[in-house]
Amino acid sequence: MIENIIGSKSKIAVLKALFKEKNKKSTTIRKLALASATPYSVTYRDIEHFMKEDFIKIKKNGANKIISFNKNHRLYQKIYTLLSVEEDIDEIETETKPKKMFKHKTGLIIVHHNADPDAIGSAIALARGFNQSNLKCEIFAPGGLSAQSKRLLEKYPYPINEKIKEYPPLVFILDTSSPEQLNGAKIPNKCKTIIIDHHRPGKLASTADMKIIDPSAHSTAVLVYDMLTSAGIQITAEIAFFLMSAIVADTGFFKLIDKRDLNIINKLIDLVDLNDVFASLSTRIEYDEKIARLKGMQKTEAYTIKDKIIVFSEVNSFESKVAKHMITSFADIAIVENINKDNIRISGRARKYLEDYVDLSLIFKGIGKDIKGNGGGHKTAASANGSDNNNREIVKDKIKTYLESALNGRIKQLK
């Protein structure tokens, strides 16, 4: 898939350099490292990755390795078009002023329904950063904002559209992997779409013109930070607040951070008051969510595999928060459905310690097809959205079978 080839800024930089050198007889890794302003070790790693994807070929010429494209690769022409012929993004370079990143003067940033702090924080940071580069972007949240996201806007208000009349030629889709998460929003085919996301690639990735997708990232915000800083965008206090809020929220208040997160946090910390971030994210539970939690508990079916508790439930709203509540309370794995006339949404959560045993994103990608939709996510947090709720029992049985295999035990219902 294309995101395997252009899934990071170093890969994009190396490929651009390679396209410029493609007609020369002696293109080496060292020359590419210099031309792409990328460390030799990083260039070497990326070249090895391109070889595994069969996107390039290498032959030895004395002590040198001569690199050339596999022009028969099914993605060659598409990537060549993106990075060479119809290139929108300027070459990565070091400047003291923001560079103009795109040809277009207007754009649109879309986030998923009930947009969480990572989605809305990343979107606002990106919009504010693009503004320095003379690209004006509106933000479109077709399914509204979560309570936490609304609280973020109390610190730095920003206009969020829940309806859009006309789509500009350039559309960014943030923190979203499937079209079902866009609450019915239909992006015209004439628009050039760019996905920035930290979930496993879903259906949207297969139709996008460009993707910055990294499932190893704990938040979309870290990808936005990399994009802005590589373009020479000044990280203001406002941008820092939204990026930090997104990182704090998606790492569980710093419970899941890695070196990459720490590096960005260290650069943002002097620009933002963490007390403001924590206060904005620490929202009280709204009445409707309390009711959803109660109803979810009432409709719970509990099972065990060895010493692990697995629960299935059904609610009319807040399915992801109900699943998360069950995980933080007592369950090891929680699967919660939200069903109405037009669609079905299923949210799955698992405790962090299980990520070496289960991968919910895999099973949810499969059941997304069973409900005539899409699914995906992370190992311990995934979801599926579709339009057919007739296969609910089939979906439940598939999840049970998968969990029995993953956890190496028989599932038994608790009476």
Image (cartoon, rainbow, N blue to C red):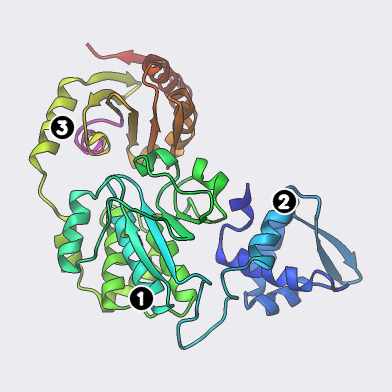
> Which amino acid does the dot numbered 3 rest on?
Arg
Q: Position of residue 120 (x, y in %)?
A: 30, 57
Give the residue at x 53% y 53%.
190
Give the residue at x 34% y 63%.
138
Q: Which residues are magenta?
A: 324-337
The answer to whether residue 23 is above or below residue 403 is: below
User: To which residue does mark 1 refer?
Assistant: 267
User: To which residue does mark 3 refer?
Assistant: 293
Using the numbered discs, state the Cα–Cα distance from disc 2 to disc 3 in whole angstroms: 47 Å
Quick check: marks 1 and 3 in contact, CB under 8 Å?
A: no
Q: Position of residue 98 (x, y in %)?
A: 45, 82
Q: Position of residue 211 (x, y in %)?
A: 54, 56
Q: Position of residue 39 (x, y in %)?
A: 63, 75
Q: For residue 51, which quarter of the picture?
A: bottom right
The residue lying toward the viewer, choosing from 318 and 81, is 81
> Which amino acid does the dot numbered 1 rest on?
Lys
Q: Secondary structure at mark 3?
A: helix
Using the numbered discs, state the Cα–Cα distance from disc 1 to disc 3 in whole angstroms: 38 Å
Q: Is residue 271 left or right of residue 199?
A: left
Q: Secondary structure at mark 2?
A: helix
Give the residue at x 70% y 72%.
17
The residue lying toward the viewer, choosing from 297 and 306, is 297
User: To which residue does mark 2 refer?
Assistant: 52
Q: Is residue 389 left or right of residue 70?
A: left
